[in-house]
Image: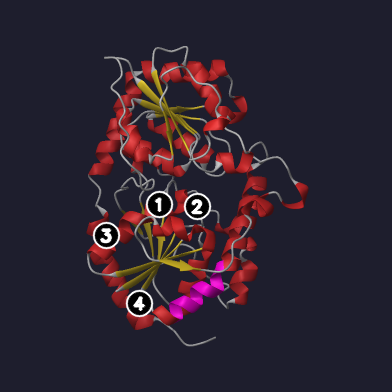
Amino acid sequence: MRVLFTTFPAPSHFFPMVPLAWALRAAGHEVAVASQPSYLNAVRGTGLPAVKAGVDVDLSAVWYQDGETDPGWRSSEEARSARGMRMFAAVAEAMAGDVIGFARRWRPDVVVYEPRAYAGLVAAEVLGLPLVRHLWGTDYTCERWDIESPALAPLLERHGVPDADHLGTVTLDVCPPRLQLAEAPNRTMMRYVPFNGSGIVPDLPAGPRGKPRVCVTWGTTFVKQTGHLDPVRCAVEALCDLDVDILVAIGAGHRHLIGELPAGTPVLESVPLNLSLPACDAIVHQGGAGTTITAAVLGVPQLVVPSFADEPVNARQVAASGAGRSLPLAETTVDRVRAEAGALLEGTGYARAARAIRDEVAGLPAPAALVEAMEALGDRGRRGRDLSPR
């Protein structure tokens, strides 16, 4: 069987699909991952074959169109959604032709796409292939098609699939059930296996007995869109007034953005979160899907400080589950972060709820358990695909 994965060029979109791709390869199947040229090294870094699709889209230029300078987290949800869909549609426009062309030559049996890799949706519809919609977190896109699809209408019309079903044949849900918004039609649950990139396990010294360690991180997107990590500095300053050890996790080359830190504070650059977070008792972060779900499946209580995209949704779900607290970035001060982090560490209920999520996820089917179902879809794809030129 051959399975074609398609992804928007961002770790939070792609990394959650990697464990399924690994499971398929381990079972003897062929896998390929299509994305923008600039993202192919990230794909190759997972050990998976990469396929170049289209040309690179300057995401910042699309996001800050018409001279906009504000990153957008204080704007309305509708305005943020319009910016996002403008960006996702531009990438899909760039990728779709090459994805379809590669699929005609390679002859996949199934297409797997994450909910913003719309080139995969188009290719599956054009070729008549089963489409697996692979979530990366809370399914906030499920019921937004009527609002968001107009941005994709020109692409769908051009390829002759104006009525494409964004939900596909099946939705593969890796979000912990206690954090999920709603159950998508034709949903299949799969255990979220944390993968935040390749790295070396850090040698973290044990902290003083009884003293909690708190991780502070702000993901991969915030600094790209803003050029700073001011919230990290704010969180560290707030935590310095609490009786905790602090661990700061940042991307490669971002050390200069956080300035001076208390002596002895470990700073991990470009170390996968799933390798460092097990040594921590709590985490303060921006609410990106990868960080949120990784912390959830590892049973770590969270203080989420969201700003844009799906972050506010993730923050609400974490707070509603009892596994953490939420503080909007626009309301963030050192005093507020100190108070929220203190409440998180003092309340035993947060740790208990976080462990409950961890234990619930451990009982879900592992990626390897989904291979048989994928094989059944592959059989269906071989019978129904249309590889004729259009």
Q: Position of residue 127 (x, y in %)?
A: 46, 79
* Disc 3 packing (10 Å; few <14; some 14–19; many ≥20): some
Predominant SS of the magenta segment: helix
The amino acid pointed to by label 1 is Phe
Q: Marks 4 and 2: in contact by CB < 8 Å? A: no
Instruction: State the separation of the CA atoms marked 3 and 2.
Output: 21 Å
The amino acid pointed to by label 2 is Ala
Q: Looking at the image, which is closer to me, 9 or 354?
A: 9
| Residue 10 - label | 2
Q: How is the protein colored in the picture?
A: secondary structure
Label 4: which secondary element: helix
* Disc 4 packing (10 Å; few <14; some 14–19; many ≥20): many
User: Magenta segment, which residues?
Assistant: 95-104
Instruction: State the separation of the CA atoms marked 1 and 2.
Output: 8 Å
The amino acid pointed to by label 4 is Gly
Instruction: State the separation of the CA atoms marked 4 and 1.
Output: 25 Å
Q: Earlier in the sequence, mark 1 or mark 3?
A: 1
Q: Position of residue 24 (x, y in %)?
A: 28, 64
Residue 307 location, quadrant:
top right
Q: Earlier in the sequence, mark 3 or mark 2?
A: 2
Residue 27 position (above or below residue 12): below
Which residue is tagged 4? 381
Which residue is tagged 3? 23
Is any part of residue 328 visible from this angle? no
Label 1: which secondary element: helix
Instruction: State the separation of the CA atoms marked 4 and 3.
Output: 19 Å
Residue 103 location, quadrant:
bottom left
